[in-house]
Amino acid sequence: MGFYAAKQLVKKLIAAGKNIQQSKVLIMGVTFKENVNDIRNSKVADVVCELKSYGVNVDIIDPHANSEELNHEYGFSLCGKPSDDYDAIIVAVNHKSYMQLTENDFKNMMKNVENPILVDIKGIYRSKIKDLQYWSF
């Protein structure tokens, strides 16, 4: 699942005319499942590693995960706070705090460019996204 999601996003970035090595992606959620702090067996680590193997710049946030534990286990850390210059956002874990986000919240985190991409792994925003390029499983 993780490798597939990353490859599909890379294809979408290329189709949108973005330079992969200059693309910046935010991954929201890295724990094993929603609303817990357990990172063991997280498939999100596969997404991060696959995107980085293409040269994509990746930021990761998660209100439940521990950055030091992530670094020790997987070799990457959480970023402090998301910026406003992402080409794509992946919502990987449906934490309760993410369920409140609107399309405008995502737009505010993305570059003011054409075709910003929202990947919704769990499908929690299905039928709620109108302006962003939306993809879910």
Image: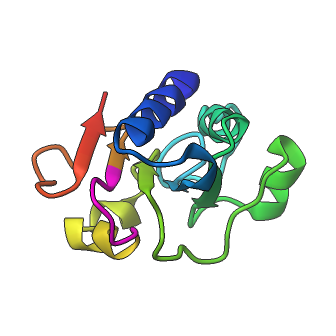
Judge left or right: residue 37 versus residue 90: right
Give the residue displayed 84% in from the left and 53% down from the top.
71
Q: Is residue 25 above or below residue 53?
A: below
Residue beneath the point at 52% across and 76% down = 83
| Residue at (50, 22) in percent of width and height | 4
Camera-nearest residue between 73 and 87:
87
- Of residues 2 and 117, the one drawn nearer to the viewer in this rendering: 117
x and y percentages locating residue 55 in the rendered image:
69, 43
Q: Could you tell me what secondary structure mostly forms the magenta stretch?
A: loop
Q: Report the number of discs.
A: 0
Q: Tell me if 60 is positioned left or right of 9 in this view.
A: right
Q: Image check: 112 left or right of 31?
A: left
134 up-or-down from 57: above or below: above
Q: Is residue 136 above or below residue 131?
A: above
Q: Is residue 105 visible in the rendered structure shown here?
A: yes
* Residue stretch in magenta: 110-117
Q: Residue pushed farthest right?
A: 72
| Residue 78 spot, x, y in % from top left | 69, 63
Asked if residue 123 can be seen in this view, the reply is no
